């Protein structure tokens, strides 16, 4: 049986050295160890141990960040205008005859919000999936296969990028992509980046789940997401150095979808939103508005420490 430990090579090396020191101290005896006897042998052993740990493959399935979040909305045109008022432009869209339109709203060269129309009025609005970017999708696919996730092979999608997807324990879609030269996303780099954008980084997306312990275990053990201690709701940092996150929140009658953007100044963000005729809700550590379907759009400071949620107050 193979056991996967979701940790970095650096962390693994520190762990191996720690246990090596503990082993030598126990077997040599604390006085001899402290007095430095056999130090040459000790240092040689530790050096070999560290080199071995450094040579171990780092199996953490690193991601480049959140590529997009996809929402089903009641009116694509209305939602597109909402994002346009925030300074975000449409990069491209698909509007096939007889099918609901899909609009790609650009946050940055690597991040988008996808707006899907409803096939009928009975379809619920809300989050459809979170889409992650990988620098090397083949390596990611190989790692996930080793972890028993059995994703289908990556394929080229309509927009021209490689992608694969599979489902979590609650059958929610998890989607991964690698941007390719020639794709609609890649060729739009440097375009549709208005200076009026209220933010430039989509930091976090919230997933509403039915079984919080099971989803948390899946994300941390299988996907190697890292828990952010003390955060409420439960927040997980995605593997890699992007700093992007997902929230896992238990579904209730009042739970609403939300995404979080990072900004450099909350007061100026709130003032600019009011200037653009948005109704602004403020708390001690965030500013928020609602989209036409009631989804929360939250703005918080870059690198803000996780805090217990507080109820917002409205300021006109």
Image (cartoon, grey):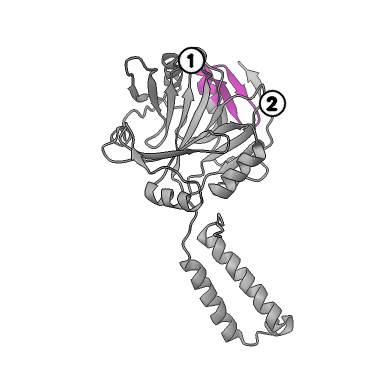
Residue 305 visible somewhere in the drawing = no
User: Residue 315's image quarter?
Assistant: top right
Q: Is residue 284 rendered magenta in the image? A: yes
Span shown in magenta: 270-291
Q: Residues within 10 Å of mark 1 (few under 14, many from 20)?
A: many
How far across and down, in percent of the image, does residue 58 sit?
A: 48, 59
Front one among 199 and 34: 34
The quadrant of the rendering that contains the C terminus is: top right
Q: Is residue 17 above or below residue 137?
A: below
Residue receiving disc 2: 311
Residue that mark 1 sits on: 74
Among numbered discs 2 and 1, the one appearing first in the sequence: 1
The residue depicted at 54 percent of the width and 38 percent of the height is 168
Tally of numbered discs? 2
Res 310 seen here: yes
Q: Is residue 185 magenta?
A: no
């Amino acid at each position: 049986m193979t056991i996967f430990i979701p940790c970095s090579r650096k962390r693994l090396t520190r762990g191996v050295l720690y246990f090596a020191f503990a082993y030598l101290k126990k077997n040599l005896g604390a006085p001899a160890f402290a007095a430095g006897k056999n130090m040459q042998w000790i240092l040689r052993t530790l050096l070999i141990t560290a080199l071995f740990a450094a040579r171990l493959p780092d199996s953490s399935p690193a991601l480049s960040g959140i590529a997009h979040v996809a929402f089903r909305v009641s009116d694509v045109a209305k939602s597109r205008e909402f994002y346009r008022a925030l300074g975000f432009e449409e990069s491209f869209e698909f509007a096939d005859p007889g099918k609901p339109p899909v609009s790609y709203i650009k946050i940055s060269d690597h991040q988008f919000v996808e707006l899907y129309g409803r096939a009928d009025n009975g379809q619920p609005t809300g989050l459809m999936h979170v889409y992650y970017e990988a620098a090397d999708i083949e390596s990611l696919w190989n790692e996930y296969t080793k972890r028993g996730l059995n994703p289908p092979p990556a394929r080229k999608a309509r927009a021209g990028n490689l992608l694969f997807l599979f489902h979590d324990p609650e059958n929610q879609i998890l989607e991964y992509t690698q941007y390719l030269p020639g794709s609609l996303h890649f060729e739009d780099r440097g375009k549709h980046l208005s200076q009026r954008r209220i933010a430039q980084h989509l930091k976090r997306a919230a997933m509403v789940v039915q079984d919080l312990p099971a989803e948390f275990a899946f994300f941390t053990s299988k996907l190697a997401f890292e828990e952010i201690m003390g955060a409420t709701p439960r927040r997980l940092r995605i593997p890699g150095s992007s700093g992007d996150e997902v929230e896992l929140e238990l579904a209730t009658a009042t739970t609403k979808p939300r995404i979080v953007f990072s900004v450099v100044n909350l007061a100026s963000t709130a003032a600019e939103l009011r200037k653009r005729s948005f109704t602004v809700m403020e708390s001690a550590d965030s500013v928020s508005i609602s989209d036409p379907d009631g989804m929360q759009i939250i703005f918080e400071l870059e690198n803000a420490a996780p805090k217990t949620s507080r109820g917002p107050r409205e300021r006109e």
